[in-house]
Image (tube, rainbow, N blue to C red):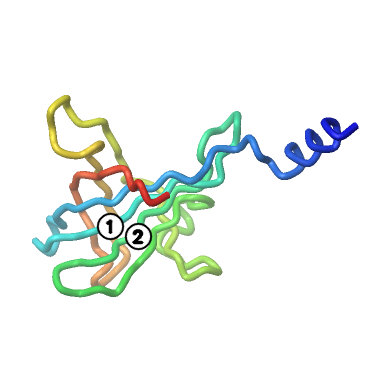
Amino acid sequence: MKFLSLGLLLLSANAFASPAVSYSCVGKNSVTKEAVTFEVLFAESDLELGYTNQAITVTKQGWETSPVTFQMYGATKANACQKNESGELYHSAGFKMDSVKKGSLGDFTMSFRANCGERLDFNVKGVCFFDLGN
């Protein structure tokens, strides 16, 4: 009976879902010609769909440290650049992440584009490292 209770508890808590995965990245915004540091987060995994929540948080652009988060979950062409209830900007397209060639620096190369107004115009290419903190 103990094992049955434990099994039901694990299933109800979604204990078999994958944990969040995050990457720390550095790159350059070709629009502003400034260095950019950003984080990429994949969370809320579904066994059939994979990660269902992807977000990019630009933590620093040039010397400016006013973070902005682009949320891809729930984003469409119609709501692109609009803020959600958490203050994140919806971002529906222009995101690409590839494995690096063997022997290269980093775990992935990444590029993203967003044109959401002044200081929110991005065409970034960078390299990302798996964040061991998560």
- Front-most of residues 13 and 25: 13
Q: Which residue is mark 2?
A: 57
Crowd class of label 1 (few under 14; some 14 to 19; many from 20; radius 10 Å) = many
Secondary structure, mark 2, is strand
- Residues at badges 1 and 2 in contact (C-beta under 8 Å)? yes
Rendered view: 91 above or below 89? above
Rendered view: 122 above or below 12? below
Compared across the picture, whether 55 is left or right of 45 comes to left
Residue 29 marker: none
Among numbered discs 1 and 2, the one appearing first in the sequence: 1
Whole-percent x and y of residue 41?
41, 50
Q: Amino acid at mark 1?
A: Phe
Compared across the picture, whether 81 is left or right of 15 comes to left
Crowd class of label 2 (few under 14; some 14 to 19; many from 20; radius 10 Å) = some
Residue 38 marker: 1
The residue shown at (38%, 51%) is 133
The residue shown at (53%, 52%) is 74
Whole-percent x and y of residue 84?
52, 66
Q: Amino acid at mark 2?
A: Thr
Compared across the picture, whether 45 is left or right of 109 comes to right
Q: Quadrant of residue 2?
A: top right
Rendered view: 50 above or below 82? above
